[in-house]
């Protein structure tokens, strides 16, 4: 008997209930104990009927002297009962639960818990929790946990079963961690944690219990992914891409600037990884404009120097094209062949050393031989399947290419290391040209016209260029028709307002050729104002664009706004970001105000994290974060502790043999 037993081992849990539980991902006793309350009702105050005052939330105990169904004119039923103790009487009412009349036995003693109200001028409890006196202490007379109901299962049923599971399995809940470790962490034993969370005496216990269970969850995540990583490294072999100081130097000669410190660090980390037969699996994280492309180019360069090809996959055609042009420029002197493969274009695929494309390159007749490195830009824009299928194309038996993924999402290191425990991490923490020179304004609606006039002058006198980002209408991966319509009408409106200016419209439904033309014109300065949908081109690089307008800014996440803002102020001149918002919400204003004041993507992510959950900040699902039961991605302290403990466990394999082997057995 242990916690891995199926729930059907519990009394009163048969096939019917187990299949309902299964749908909520509960199949073992352990899973059931990990189903934690979302709230508690404080029924701990037990009182005599005469002493219960209107408005009190209490538990009373008494004999049921009367219970009956009454039928209303509308065909509803009301259940009424009268309960007495030695001090007085109280009425109880339920609605539409006719079976209660059979469940609750007359002349027997029950506990009832709820709020004392006045109904028809009599002391009454409406829809109380109740249980037999001799079995009480589960649904009444304590801090009573409320569980989210699962389809077909009530909170009360869950409470009873969980309580029973705790009773039956209390000696079988094995503590995996040594007492000394627990003491150092300040956490209770796992056994106590389950009691605290399902059967707390006070708020403090709830907090302690939750912390320990959250820790347990993170620890398991960390250890299993670290074990997975070790196994993956053991079972796959990548080509060694030899390099040394000289190789790095010869690359630096190809680029027109010096690397930032964090670019340099990342380049070295990557160089070390590639110089090894253990396949690299590294995530490069850095704000928009932090210079990830060059780092990727460096990795590809090392592959070429070792007579291996590389593939770079970008989420959109425009980005793929931009990378293609950047790479061509950098590698011109070295005569390195660059190929392009998108849905609408195929260039130089035969003789290329570096193939750049969108996910279309998976399906194009690209030759995947000799590929030693895969780079994936804006990795979260791809589905897990798309990423995997590219790797599958290249992988042969034990042969595994090195993988570099890149993202502009500022996920703090500790969180990233837990969510992507199988990856190594390089962060680009500073911007190439020092602090970004962007002024952010929150523009009230009544200042819209003056703002347009100011922009008009900027365009006419200083030849400035403007980005206009349309409101995010619905959160979705794909651009919807509605979204495009909104961009079109904004475009028409602005054409009216800026009569003498050339305005462009960019959205995902345009043909590649049309998109290219518009972007080219924008880059040349032929277009002064570019209106686009929000999903278009996070990474687009136009150094002369210095003004950004974001409509309905409150609908975007802070990270998103920050990324959009990152497109301006890239050149020598000061950049401006104008946020329009009709929202009256204080919270929305607070977020925009944070954006105005703060210029670091990582800091903004922290602020956003405290104002909203990580799910909303980054779209944890979209970013492939594992699902959590008890823990939250904002539990940074717990995440840190779990990470440290996991590392200690894996570096003391003998001491923790049992823990490791148990978790190992759970990895599929
Ligand atoms: P992102 O991280 O958003 O992909 P990019 O790689 O597109 O950023 O870089 C943004 C711009 O900064 C590009 O024009 C690039 O040439 C430039 N850049 C990158 N690294 C440096 C550097 N170390 N010094 C100066 N400019 C740089
Ligand atoms: Mg980029």
Image: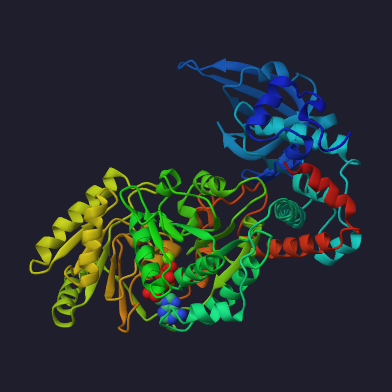
- Whole-percent x, y for residue 306 in the image: 57, 66
Ligand 1 location (quadrant): bottom left
Confirm whether residue 168 shows in the render.
yes
Colouring used for the render: rainbow
Pick whichever, 383 or 270, lies toward us.
Answer: 270
For the point 65% across and 27% down, the residue is 20
Placement of the C terminus among the 4 image quadrants: top right
For the point 62% across and 56% down, the residue is 419
Q: As displayed, is residue 277 above or below residue 9?
A: below
Q: As displayed, is residue 489 above or below residue 274?
A: above
- Whole-percent x, y for residue 487 in the image: 23, 54
Image quadrant in which you'd find residue 180: bottom right
Q: Is residue 103 left or right of residue 654?
A: left
Image quadrant in which you'd find residue 38: top right
Placement of the N terminus among the 4 image quadrants: top right
Pick whichever, 209 or 608, lies toward us.
Answer: 608
Extreme residue toward the left, this view: 500
Q: As displayed, is residue 156 above or below residue 174?
A: above
For the point 32% across and 80% down, the residue is 571
For the point 83% across and 63% down, the residue is 651
- Whole-percent x, y for residue 494 in the image: 15, 62
Pick whichever, 622 or 577, lies toward us.
Answer: 622
- Whole-percent x, y for residue 200 in the image: 77, 48
Q: Is residue 178 left or right of residue 137?
A: right
């Amino acid at each position: 008997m242990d916690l891995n037993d199926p729930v059907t081992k519990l009394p009163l849990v048969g096939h019917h209930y187990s299949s309902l539980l299964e749908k909520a991902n509960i199949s073992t006793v352990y899973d059931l104990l990990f189903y934690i309350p979302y709230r508690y009702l404080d029924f701990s105050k037990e009182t005599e009927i005469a002493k219960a005052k209107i408005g009190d939330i209490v538990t009373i105990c008494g004999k049921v002297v009367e219970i009956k169904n009454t039928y209303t004119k509308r065909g509803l039923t009301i259940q009424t009962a009268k309960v007495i103790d030695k001090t007085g009487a109280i009425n109880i009412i339920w609605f539409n639960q006719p079976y209660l009349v059979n469940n609750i036995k007359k002349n027997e003693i029950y506990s009832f818990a709820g709020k004392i109200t006045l109904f028809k001028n009599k002391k009454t409890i409406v829809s109380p929790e109740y249980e037999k006196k001799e079995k009480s202490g589960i649904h009444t007379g304590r801090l009573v946990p409320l569980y989210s109901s699962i389809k077909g299962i009530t909170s009360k049923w869950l409470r009873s079963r969980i309580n029973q599971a705790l009773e039956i399995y209390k000696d079988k809940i094995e503590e995996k961690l040594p007492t000394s470790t627990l003491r150092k962490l300040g956490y209770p034993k796992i056994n106590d944690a389950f009691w605290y969370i399902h059967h707390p005496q006070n708020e403090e216990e709830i907090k302690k219990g939750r912390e320990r269970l959250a820790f347990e969850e993170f620890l398991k995540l960390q250890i299993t992914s670290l074990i997975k990583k070790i196994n993956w490294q053991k079972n796959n072999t990548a080509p060694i891409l030899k390099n040394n100081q000289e190789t790095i130097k010869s690359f630096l000669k190809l680029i027109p600037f010096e690397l930032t410190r964090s670019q340099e660090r990342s380049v070295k980390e990557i160089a070390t990884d590639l110089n090894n037969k253990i396949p690299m699996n590294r995530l490069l994280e850095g704000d928009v404009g932090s210079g990830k492309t060059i780092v990727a180019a460096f990795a590809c360069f090392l592959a070429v120097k070792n007579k291996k090809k590389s593939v770079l996959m970008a989420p959109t055609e425009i980005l793929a094209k931009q990378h293609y042009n950047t790479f061509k420029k950098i590698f011109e002197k070295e005569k390195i062949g660059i190929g392009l493969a998108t849905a609408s274009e195929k260039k130089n695929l035969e003789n290329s050393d570096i193939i750049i494309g969108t996910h279309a390159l998976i399906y194009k007749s690209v030759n995947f031989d000799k590929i030693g490195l895969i780079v994936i830009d804006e990795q979260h824009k791809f589905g897990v399947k798309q990423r995997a299928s590219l790797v599958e194309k290249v992988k042969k038996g034990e042969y595994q290419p090195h993988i570099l993924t890149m993202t502009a999402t500022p996920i703090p290191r500790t969180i990233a290391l837990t969510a992507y425990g199988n990856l190594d991490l390089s962060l680009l923490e500073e911007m190439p040209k020092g602090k970004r020179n962007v002024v952010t304004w929150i523009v009230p609606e009544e200042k819209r016209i003056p703002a347009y006039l100011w922009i008009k002058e900027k365009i006419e006198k200083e030849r400035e260029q403007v980005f206009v980002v349309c409101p995010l209408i619905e959160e979705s991966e794909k651009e919807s028709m509605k979204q495009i319509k909104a961009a079109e009408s904004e475009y028409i409106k602005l054409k009216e307002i800026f009569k003498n200016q050339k305005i462009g419209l960019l959205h995902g439904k345009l043909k590649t050729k049309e998109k290219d033309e518009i972007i080219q014109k924008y880059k040349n300065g032929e277009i002064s104002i570019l209106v686009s949908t929000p999903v278009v081109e996070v990474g687009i690089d136009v150094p002369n664009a210095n003004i950004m307008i974001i409509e309905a800014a409150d609908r975007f996440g802070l990270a998103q706004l920050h990324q959009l803002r990152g497109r301006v102020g890239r050149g020598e001149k000061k950049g401006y970001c104008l946020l329009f918002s009709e929202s009256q919400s204080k919270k929305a204003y607070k977020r925009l105000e944070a954006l105005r004041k703060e210029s670091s993507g990582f800091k903004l992510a922290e602020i956003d994290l405290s104002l909203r959950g990580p799910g909303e900040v980054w779209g944890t699902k979209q970013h492939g974060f594992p699902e959590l039961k008890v823990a939250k991605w904002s539990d940074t302290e717990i995440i840190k502790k779990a990470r440290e403990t996991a590392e200690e466990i894996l570096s003391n394999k003998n001491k923790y043999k049992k823990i490791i082997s148990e978790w190992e057995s759970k990895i599929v």
